[in-house]
Amino acid sequence: MTLDPKLLEILVCPIDKGELLYFPAEDTLYNPRLRRRYSVKQNIPIMLVDESQVVDEEEHVRLMTLSKSS
């Protein structure tokens, strides 16, 4: 199941208020500017900074490659 497109239009990173990339196969929203990943659990975005993850360079490159192939 994927997130509602209308919800995706309004979701932003809680830190920089910028646009997020969505990876439905990984249940992840990603901010490439801050290299921060937010989980989506049971179709609910977890937009809490304390529960987000900072990704390393390798994971950032992987996610950016995925975003370009979508």
Image (cartoon, rainbow, N blue to C red):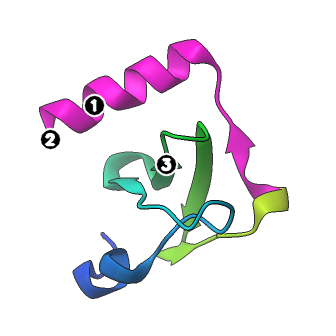
Q: Which mark sits nearer the N-terminus, 3 or 2? A: 3
Helix, strand or loop at disc 1? helix
Q: Is residue 40 above or below residue 10?
A: above
Helix, strand or loop at disc 2? loop
State the residue at coordinates (24%, 79%): 5
In the rendered view of the protein, which quadrant contains the N terminus?
bottom left
Q: Which mark sits nearer the N-terminus, 3 or 1? A: 3
Instruction: Name the kind of residue labelled 3 in the image.
Output: Tyr
Q: Residue 33, how many percent across, how many down? A: 52, 40
In the rendered image, residue 65 lying in the magenta stretch gets the answer yes
Instruction: Name the kind of residue labelled 2 in the image.
Output: Ser
State the residue at coordinates (27%, 86%): 6
Q: What is the distance, in whole Å, between disc 3 and disc 1 at their CAs?
A: 11 Å
Q: Which residue is mark 2?
A: 70
Q: Are marks 3 and 1 in contact (CB under 8 Å)?
A: no
Helix, strand or loop at disc 3? strand
Asked if residue 65 lies left or right of residue 51, the reply is: left
Residue 48 occupies quadrant: bottom right
Q: Which residue is mark 1?
A: 66
Q: Is residue 56 above or below residue 23?
A: above
Q: Is residue 59 above or below residue 32?
A: above
Residue 66 occupies quadrant: top left
Mark 3 packing: few (<14 Cα in 10 Å), some, or many (20+)? Answer: many
Mark 2 packing: few (<14 Cα in 10 Å), some, or many (20+)? Answer: few
Front-most of 70 and 14?
14
